[in-house]
Every structure is written in structure tokens, then in C-alpha cells.
Image (cartoon, helix red, strand yellow):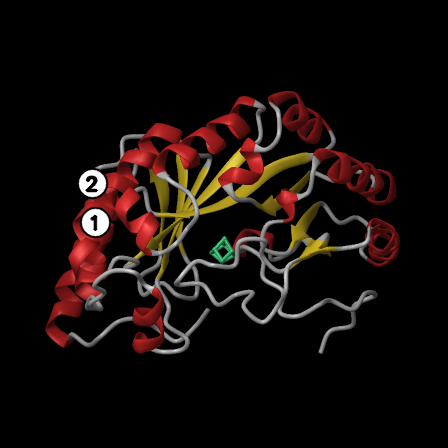
Amino acid sequence: MLFSPVTYNEPVFRPPGEANSVIIQATLGCSWNQCSFCEMYTSKKFKVRNQEEVIAEIQKLSKYYKGAKKIFLADGNAFILSSKKLVPLLKQINSDFGRIQRVSSYALPKDILNKSVSELQELKAHGLKLLYIGIETGDDALLKLINKGETYNSTVDGILKAQQASIDTSIMILNGIGGKKYSQQHALNSAKIINEINPKFLSTLTLSLPYGIEHFQSKFKGDYTQQSITELYEELKLLIQNTKVNNVIYRSDHVSNNLILKGILSKDNDKLISTIEQAVAITSENEYPSAPSVL
Ligand code: SF4
């Protein structure tokens, strides 16, 4: 096990793009913690950590990780903290770490909407430059079925508000979240929301069922039938075919993904679609059920 100058409250999650970032747990767990597909923080009760303790950890981490360029504020949605609580943390980070390139965190659209544009601008001025938002789908019916606690409109409003304050957004869509029945509307409405918000980054992850299909079906409020890998690819293809955006950096390289895809949307759409079609041709000959058992 690697040495760390602080003891983290496990489990700790961070986006793949934050693999080399220093992680600071400003909150524990997820304030929502009710999405039907998510088991990330079900073992934790949401808590805002004591500010002095977090500041003491920033001081310790800055001595150990000298020269670090990126900081990720954990856990599930540290951005729920008010700007009154976030600004002192950002000031401490800037003063202790020095030349930090960016601070980022997971956020829910409601966390963004609860802040004014001037508060968001102040956070940006103190280095909070990127928010990761798992919107999962742009389909309102599915958002209800997975109990996301957000709608198409609240998601668009939150993300555009962050972008209005010049905070970049990294969006996550969950391939397979609706199963066979909702696949088409999931792909089309997810493309629609991506087109409307034009995030800086887009990732597609694949639905994982760490506790099995029945456990997920008991939490999903609709009729879930698992897709084959070919059907997941077809859903992804439909999504990409319908995106019309400017310079969105796209990645499908999470551990849950069966196919690695990287490109710039919409410039690389044809290339990405061709790669998916090749994968469909290979996979459909040896089809087996999807859903890897990973978080
Ligand atoms: S998906 Fe995000 S918002 Fe939903 S329970 Fe998990 S961490 Fe919380």
C-alpha cells in the first residue's frame, strides 16, 4: 500500500482524468446517494467535514506532494459546499501548493444552481476550473426511473450556469442505463442534451452491476432488460451519430467500457462510428451478455 500523509475515509473515487491529482476530501459520501445504479457511496453517510481538519490536511498534503499541479476535491459532490466554505479551502490550496493549474470536483446540477453566477466566478478566480457532472442520460423519463433527482432542464440550466462563469464541465453518460426498452430514447435525448450544453469533455461509461441484475432491477423503477454488448455498441453509435458539437473531447476509456474510444466530437464522428461498426461486426459473432462487475 502506498504511503499517504493523511488517512482517507474509504472508499475514495475520482475520475480517470484525476489519476495524478492530489485528493482532498472536503465532504464524505454523496449528498443525494439515491441513484438506482450507483453503489459508490452506499457504505457512507453524507457528511460535510470540519473545515479546520480539511485545512490541516491541505497543509500536510502540500508538504508531501510538492509541485502538484492538480487537486481533486472529493467525495461524491464536494461542490455541494457553499462558496463561503469553498473559497477558504481554495485560498489555502493556492497558498500552500503554489502554482496549481486547476482544482476540480464532482457536482450535481442542483449544486451549481444553488450558487449565483458571481459566486461561481469567484470560485473560478480561486482556481476551481472544472466540474465533473454525471448526467447519465438526457431522457427525462429515464432520469425519473433511475431516481437521478434532476431533469433535462435542471441539468442544462446548471451546466450552462457553470459555463457562464467560465468553469469547464466534464459530462458523463451511462451507456446501457435504460436496458433494451429505453435504449433509443436514451441515445437520442442524450445526444440532444450534449448538443445543447457543448461541454469541454464528454465520457461514456457503461452500466455496471456489481450486485447483479436482480439488485439493480429492484431499484430501477421501470422495465429493465439487459442489453448485449452489440446492443450497447449500437446505442453508443446512435448517440455519436446524433451529436453535433464543437470541439468536445470525447473518451470511452473507463474500466467499465468494452471498447476504448477517443476523439474530438463532432470532427471525429465518422472515425468513431466506423470503429464501433468494426466492433459490432466482431462482437456479434461471439455474443455474450454485458455488464461487467465493476464499479
Ligand atoms: S451517481 Fe452521483 S449523484 Fe447519484 S448516488 Fe452516485 S455519486 Fe450520488
Asked if the residues shown at circle 2 and circle 1 are in contact, with their CB atoms under 8 angstroms apart, the answer is: yes
Q: In the rendering, which numbered label is found on residue 241? A: 2
Residue 81 lies, with reference to residue 226, above or below; the image says above
Horizontal side of residue 139 vs 76, given as left or right: left
Q: Residue at x 32, y 65 (%)?
A: 258
Q: In the rendering, which numbered label is found on residue 291? A: none
Q: Looking at the picture, tell me which residue is in the foreground, 113 or 21.
A: 113
Horizontal side of residue 96 vs 257, given as left or right: right
SS at mark 1?
A: helix
Horizontal side of residue 40 vs 197, given as left or right: right
Distance from the alpha carbon under mark 2 to that under mark 1: 6 Å
Q: Quadrant of the N terminus?
A: bottom right
SS at mark 2?
A: helix
Residue count near mark 1 (Cα–Cα under 10 Å), binned few <14, some 14–19, many ≥20: many
Q: Residue at x 58, y 24 (%)?
A: 165
Residue 277 lies, with reference to residue 214, above or below; the image says above
Horizontal side of residue 35 vs 129, given as left or right: left
Give x and y (percent) for residue 178. Answer: 26, 57
Residue 122 lies, with reference to residue 259, above or below; the image says above
